[in-house]
Image (cartoon, grey):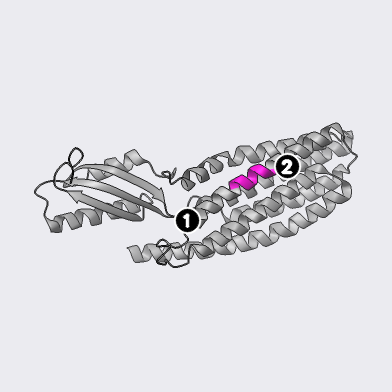
Amino acid sequence: MGHDHAHHHEAILTKVNTAFVVAIILNLVFVIIEAVVGIAIDSLSVLSDAGHNLSDVGTLALSLLAFKLMKVKATNKYTYGYRKTSVLVALFNSILLLLTIGVIVYGAVDHLFHPQEIPGLTVSIIAGIGIVINFSTALFFLRNKERDINVKSAYLHLLADALVSAGLVIGGMVIYYTHLYWLDSVFSLIIAAIILFTTWKLIKESLRLSLDGVPSTIHLEEVIELIRKAEGVKEVYHVHIWPLSSTENAMTAHLILEEAVTGEQEAHIKHELRHLLEHQNIQHVTFETERKDCRNVSC
């Protein structure tokens, strides 16, 4: 069973790695196009979108690096290898995202008071290209987005970019027909708001995982109840669950077993519980067992 899970996990990582590489290349090309056009027509909304897409490229590149480091074998100094890198990358990407929002808002406010003429039709055309690239690359991560916070981050970022590009298409056409050039700054502020709204949960989750908090996909009360229901278990306490990486979790717990449980039965109980917990996305479990209640005495 564990061997099959390992092969399945390896296959997923291979597919995700390929998705990241393709997404990085496509989005980098689009960033260059946006930057050149944005500078040429002096459009803050296009340049803001280019800046955000560039941060996405950085996010994708760092996530790809994290997945590569997850495969590095454990050493005497790093007994879990570099798996935690994927969690740190998620936190770094969140901080980078907040900085990007700050830059966009600052530029938008400045241009709001000093609007400049821009060709709305060109903005719409460039944004239209963005819809195709961002939406198609987001689909690469759709299938595995719930398996890893970095994959989910990539998916949501790219999907948000596609929605932003759709808004820019509309905005560009409005500017083209109305010549209300200050709308360019307004659309930049809307972009910043959409980015913050779509990624706020990811920001909180990456911070939680960095602090070794229980992953949002795991409910501590349900895990404790599952263990308590196991035959031969009287009580469970000192339960700690934390992420080893963005895809793997660990748990330690103290079990009080029935007095009549034999050594062979204890081994069977542990085996069954580990199997059940693996389906709760907890892959590395350590149990300490006692035949009496040690909560109020020294054991």
Residue that mark 1 sits on: 84
* Disc nearer the start of the sequence (1/2): 1
Q: Quadrant of residue 104?
A: top right
- Residue at (69% x, 44% y) in the render: 100
Residue furthest top as drawn: 113
- Residue at (68% x, 46% y) in the render: 161
Residue 154 relative to residue 221: left or right = right
Count residues near mark 1 (Cα–Cα under 10 Å), then give few for <14, some for 14-19, many for 20+. many
- Residue at (53% x, 52% y) in the render: 88
Whole-angstrom CA distance, mark 1 to mark 2, is: 29 Å
Q: Position of residue 150 (x, y in %)?
A: 54, 52
Q: Give, as a three-letter code, the residue at label 2.
A: Val
Q: Is residue 225 above or below residue 271?
A: above
Residue 153 vs residue 291, the one in the foreground: 291
Q: Position of residue 200 (x, y in %)?
A: 58, 39
Q: Main secondary structure of the magenta part?
A: helix
Residue 282 vs residue 126, the one in the foreground: 282
Is residue 25 found inside the magenta-colored segment of the image?
no
Residue that mark 2 sits on: 103
Residue 2 relative to residue 128: left or right = left
SS under mark 2: helix
Total labels drawn: 2
- Residue at (34% x, 54% y) in the render: 278
Q: Quadrant of residue 270?
A: bottom left
Q: Position of residue 217 (x, y in %)?
A: 43, 44
Q: Which mark is residue 173?
A: none
Q: Which residues are magenta?
A: 94-100
SS under mark 1: loop
Residue furthest left as drawn: 260
Count residues near mark 2 (Cα–Cα under 10 Å), then give few for <14, some for 14-19, many for 20+. some
Q: Give, as a three-letter code, the residue at label 1.
A: Lys
> Can residue 151 be seen by looking at this rendering?
no
